[in-house]
Amino acid sequence: MPLQPTPSAPWLRGLTERRCSRRGLLRAALGAAALAPLAACSVPGARKPVPRTAAEIAAAVDGFWTGRKKKGRLSFANYTQYIDTDPGDQSRHPTLAAFTRATGIKIAYDEVIDDSASWFGRIQPEFASGQGIGYDLMVVGGDSYLTKYIELGYLAPLDHSRLPHFARYGGAAFKNSSFDPGNVYTVPWQSGMTGIGYDPAKVGRKITSWQDLLDPKLSGKIGMWNDAVQMGNIALLAIGVDPEKSTHADWRKAAAWLRRQRDAGLVRSYSTATYQSSLQRGDLYASLVYSGDVFQANQSGSRLEFVVPDEGGLLWTDNLCIPSTAAHPVDALTYMDYVYRPEVAARVSETVQFVTPVPDARAVIAHDAAAATGKRRTLLESLSTSPLVFPTKADESKLRHLRVLDEAEEKQWNALFEPIYQS
Amino acid sequence: MVLPGWLWLAAFFVTPVIVMVSLSLQTGDFIDGFRQTFHFHTYAAVVETYHVQLVRSLLYGAAATTGCALVGYPVAYWIAFRAGRHKSVFLFLLLLPFFVSFVIRTQSWNVVLADNGVLLGPLKHLGLLPADFHVLATPYAVIGGLTYNFLPFMVLPVYVALERVDAKVIEASTDLYASRAQTFWRVVLPLSLPGVFAGVLLTFVPASADYVNAGILGGPSTTMIGNIIQTEYFTNLDYPAAAALSFVLMGTLLLAVFAYARALGTDDVLEVAAR
């Protein structure tokens, strides 16, 4: 008998030998090592318990503000061209200088915010790692990002005992936004309306209803937006539903309304970047617009009309808030209250020309107009009488707020409305 | 000596790619965090939802690349052989628009191509075009914008290749009684093809992934895959879907590039591109 085992056939060897050779094991280990980083780098969640009841909120306010002192400086992050400027020098902001004179608090003012999404992307890692973001005050749109900031615990609860001017002069229509009931974290900075802007000379008639945006005569001349929040909310208004009370079934009907409009070839483009200039040039006859756009366009010679449609328009606010990591929160809170003085709100409005959350600013602007001369007088006069800056009672009664969406609802919402403009 | 190169690649390419692959396989949401679950289905889901935009991006990218080659080759040829001592001036002029922001350059076409603007207005007035004719908000505007924005990426490599064509070879060809057309088709063009190849790579890949042109010049159905990735990442904060889409795009582009290399009969893509 040979001592050596006969060399077995390859197929037999495959069945009898250990499958896992050392080299194989090594290879497997290397493979696992390569996969390990895949498994390791998950993105941690950051949900914080949010105070809900009055007692919880009061405790949170106490917890945050106890022992905080005025430090004499403040850094403020804002959108571009969203505060008053000196008519002679665009880089000077008179109300900021006046604030420093009145309170001794120096302000580092930066127009660093382009839009909610990119700003969130920029500061979120700094919040997540517990560092300060370098700003004590920032402007945040009243949209789902504000909800995220609140749920993630990124905002300081406001001490309303130190906001007397907000309590006295803040317009009722602007308080209690749907995103922050009771103004626990935010106060409005500027507001605006979303409605229909159109060129009466091109359209040839009055537009009064969202249904006018289904008029085949305007085929290929209507501008809509690539913005799921605004599009969804106006479509809900168009089908006669108050967005804040809307259900999932309503959203589907609203999306169908928008699809009908698109598939009929009525919409020229979905773009928040270009609608304003297109409307001014006449490439669009009618478009979804912000009230402030129309006022500004008309200042530079256009003759556009803004309408809050019969079914309703949207009133939104951009808000001031204090990051929970702020180094100078007391100074920030002092500024928050300062801007609610009617004379300050009036100065800001004279440049920004959106809807001010301080109705009493109107009288101040009218007073300024009487004192001014020439072009400036015309501007201030049209500002103080413009329904685009100070909405009429009739318009105000037709204004509705954006629907607040939780994380799961936002997913459904986006899945319904994004495909309309991203087709 | 090789080590620093590898380190560079590891830090700026391999690490981000691993992080993105990992992200694309996770599930969860932004507030509660994403956890690794090796959820490969995300890939199938994004392809199923967005294949229209993906294919459209490749078509637009290919159309823009073709446009760049048709416009860019004569420009490069003219600068290389006809511009004489002013070559550097023309090259500078070609690059000059790059000193203006990409978005502003694109936006300016909205003014030029306006329905009743400087270009179309007079033509309509003369009755050469119907009154409702428009270029903006059509696929042609998007492809045109892409062609305009990526043109220098085609011209420069073609110019470099043409510049390197040895004058003696051209001389030899004319000595052998080749006509000017024959010299071009059989000598100059083949010698400049590596430059064209590099130009196609440099144009096709970024043009297909672009999202600015579709956003600014596009109409109701000109959305490109770059717009979708941007929305998924910034608006929806759906990082896994955005990452998965990015890899699908990357894979598709690589496939397209290798298929193109095959069709051209070159075996080693990178070698040709680097030449």
Image (cartoon, coloured by chain):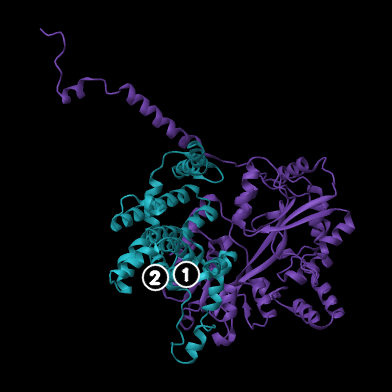
Instruction: Single out the residue that lies furthest toward the bottom.
Output: B126
Instruction: Single out the residue that lies furthest toward the front.
Output: B175
Residue A300 occupies quadrant: bottom right
Image vertical order of residue B162 relative to residue A44, above or below = below
Question: How far apart are the two marked residues, 1 and 2, measured between alpha carbons?
Answer: 15 Å
Work out whether residue A288 or residue A298 is closer to the camera in this orientation and state it: A298
Question: The residue marked by circle 2 belongs to what chain?
Answer: B
| Front disc: 1 or 2 | 1
Is residue A272 among the parts visible in the rendering? no
Image vertical order of residue A55 relative to residue A393, above or below = above
Q: Amino acid at mark 2?
A: Leu
Question: The residue marked by circle 1 belongs to what chain?
Answer: B
What residue sits right under mark 1 in the picture? B79
Work out whether residue B248 or residue A163 is closer to the camera in this orientation and state it: B248
What residue sits right under mark 2 in the picture? B70
Secondary element at tag 2: helix
Mark 2 packing: few (<14 Cα in 10 Å), some, or many (20+)? few
Residue at 56 percent of width and 45 percent of height: B31
Total numbered circles: 2
Mark 1 packing: few (<14 Cα in 10 Å), some, or many (20+)? many
Q: Amino acid at mark 1?
A: Ile
Residue at 84 percent of width and 46 percent of height: A71
Work out whether residue B237 or residue B125 is closer to the camera in this orientation and state it: B125
Q: Position of residue B244 (x, y in %)?
A: 43, 49
Disc 1 vs disc 2: Cβ atoms closer than 8 Å?
no
Q: Position of residue A263 (x, y in %)?
A: 41, 72
Q: Position of residue A107 (x, y in %)?
A: 81, 55
Chain B image colour: cyan
